[in-house]
Structure formats: C-alpha cells, structure tokens
Image (cartoon, helix red, strand yellow):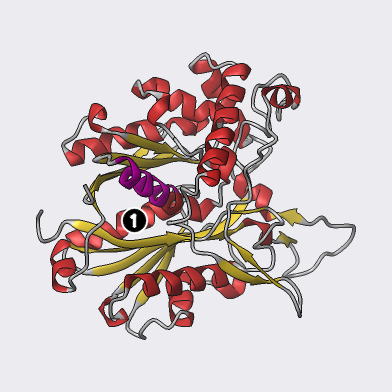
Amino acid sequence: MSSNDVVVVEMGRTAVGRMGGGFTTVPSIELATFIISEVMKKAKFDPMEVEEIILGNVENRSNESCIARWAGQRAGMPIHVVGYGINKLCGSSIKAIHCAADSIRAGRNNVVLAGGVENMTGYRYAMDKGRYGYRLGDSVLIDTLMQVLADNPDPKKRPAAQTAENLAVKYKITREDQDVFAYTSQMRAITAIKEGRFKKEIIPMEVKVSKKETKVVDTDEHPRPETTMEGLAKLPPILPGGTVTAGNCCGINDGASLMVLMSEKKAQELKMKPLAKIRGYASAGVEMHIFGIGPAPAIKKSLEMANLKLGDLGLVEINEAFAAQVIACERELGLDHNIVNVNGSAIALGHALGNTGTRISITLLHEMFRRNCKYGVSSACIGSGLGVAVVWENLCL
C-alpha cells in the first residue's frame, strides 16, 4: 500500500428508525453527537489526532446548522477539529467519504471522520411568506419532507416516482419484477436480523421517550416480516397507471453512521489495524428523468480508478430508492442479483437520506468480512441526475 492509501480503522451506525419510530424525539444533532462519541470510544486512539469531521445531511432544524462541527464539539472532540456538512441528497454521506479520501490522498489531512445523519421524522412544515407576513387571505403549510423527496424544485412537474417509471419502460421492468425484488429485499433483511448479522455494526442507543421512561433502539425498525407477494400485488401505484408502489420503493427513516478514515501511514503510526481500503470512488451525471441509473456509470468510473473490473466484485450495494431503479442498474451492468444487496437495502431497511451512503458502506464491509470477499462497491442514485460509488478492498482476509 502507498503511505497515502485511505483505510478504514473503525466504523459504526445506529439502527435505522422508522418514521415516527424510535428516534422520533432525537434530533439530527443528537444522533450525530452520539455516533461520533461511540465510534471514537470503539476506535481507542487519541482524539487529538482527528483533524476533520465531514457529515452528509440533507435537512435539519435551523439550530443544527454546521452540524458536523457542533456534533463534534458536543461529542467532546478537541477544539481544533473542524467540520462541515454535505448535501448531495441520497449520496451525501458517500460524498463525505469521497471528500475525506481526497483530503487524505492530497496530504492535507491524516485522520478524518466521515459519515452521515438524518432525522426525516423531524422534517418541518414551513410558511414561505411567514417572514414578512401575509396581506390578505389564507396560507398553507409547506411540507419540507415532500419538497426534499421531489426530483424537481417544483414537485408537481416531476415526482421522483416518475423517474423510476421511466426506467421501468426503458429496461422493460414489470410490476411483478419490482414486487419480487421488494419481497426479496424484505426477506433478506429479516433473515439478516434473525441471524444477528447487523449486531457488530449497530451501536445501541438509549432514547428518552418520557420524563421517566427510556428505551434502547438497537434493531432496524423498517423491515416488514409480514410482507407477502400477494400483499405487494394489492398495493395501488403511486402514479396513475404506473408500476411503482409504496411497497417497492424505499422508506422514510432516521439514523446516523460514521467511519474513521486515515492514511495507511498514520494507521501504522497509531498501531491501528486497517479493516478496509478505499480503492476507487467517483460521481457521475445522467439524464435527470432517469436519475436512478446513476450508480451504473459511477460504479464503472470507480472501478477504472481502482484498476478493477466488474467481475472482480464479490458484493455490490446499490441503494434501493426504487426496485425498478436497482433492477435497471443490474441490467445495465450485467450484475448477478445474488451478489447485490444481499442483506436487503432501503426498501426493507429504510432510507435516511444523508445517512444512507455510509450505512450501506458499513453493512457492505461487514458482509465482506463475513464472506471473506476481497472487493465490493457501495453506490447510490441521486435526484437531479447523479450517481456516486466507492470501491472497497477487504484487508481482513
């Protein structure tokens, strides 16, 4: 390895909370503070070595601005540790990994915490003209959640589901194809939970639910073990005449995740065991009306940087914004579904926007360790016509 190769030495995530679930009372700043504190406890090296914190985050409360810096300080990080947030929608925390890797490879930093956080349950309602008042008549509350989920500054022009429908037409993906994919995602996630596959990556969080009561959130809340093909088939399409339903698209969720990244040289100095190495990473642009295909070119570009081929990949994570979107990527790349999202993904496990990129990367790496898989890739599509990806090498073989 080169002394500036970027390695992962520690990582962790919260469980993924369902909307209105275990993290309802926990704002993003608290989720971020918790995950920074707990991952650093696991890492067991001097926090003075950390130089920067980069967190993906799409939407937060106004008192949570510059969330990476504030969360770091609340977690007890030294005053010199700088921080910033990234909003690249569903690719925010993968982009945080990109930025951390760039800074380490360039020699500007040696140790960076990269991750993501999102509490979609806490997204606010807003009044656009509230600042200066209303002259006459009624007003309406604007749901910022629906604004974020739209693939257009004007949600009425192109709802995100339409882009998945466009891919379904382009790649000849049927409603049944999508429902089978969704059912498989649910069953894979349920099996993974039953077998305890996520226990090494999830850090339980004690949450206050009332003045006298707390509960521990330690299991992903979104999976639906009662899912059946018959039940999925009965769900109405989101758009008239369409094939995308609430059952074959991602959830709306809460959670946080974090990786400790450093140069290989610094890991040696600190006597830290590298778990994995970043081999390649990239962003890609695609047509906005089919943004879900974004992971395909991003994966190809990442593999070029890594000097690897698709056939070298033992495991693949493609965030499940929509079943149609992942199926389209599989067909575009010629991937075997048996190596894609093997423990389920966002349809079953949920999608907390700014958190998901590092969440799927952490899940991928733990599965690579479990299977003794050498190379894997994590990726996500992004509204507005983008894709992001990271190629990982398992150093625990």
Rendered residue at 39%/81% (across/down):
77
Report x, y in % for residue 387: 40, 39
Q: Residue furthest front?
A: 195
| In this rendering, position of residue 201 left or right of residue 131 | left
Instruction: Give residue 304's quadrant in the image.
Output: top left
Amino acid type shown at disc 1: Ile
Name the foreground residue: 334 vs 242: 334
| Residue 41 position (above or below residue 139) | below
Q: Residue furthest top?
A: 172
Instruction: Give residue 161's quadrant in the image.
Output: top right
What's drawn in magenta, residue-wise?
Answer: 360-371
Residue located beneath label 1 in the image: 97
Rendered residue at 45%/52% (across/down):
359
Rendered residue at 61%/17% (across/down):
176
Report x, y in % for residue 236: 75, 26
Count of marks placed on residues: 1
| Residue 46 magenta-highlighted | no
| In this rendering, position of residue 77 left or right of residue 351 | left
Question: Which secondary structure class fits the magenta region best?
Answer: helix
Q: Residue furthest bottom?
A: 79
| In this rendering, position of residue 22 left or right of residue 151 | right
**Are there few (<14), some (14-19), or many (20+) residues within 10 Å of tag 1?**
many
Report x, y in % for residue 274: 22, 59
Name the foreground residue: 217 vs 153: 217
| In this rendering, position of residue 155 left or right of residue 29 | right
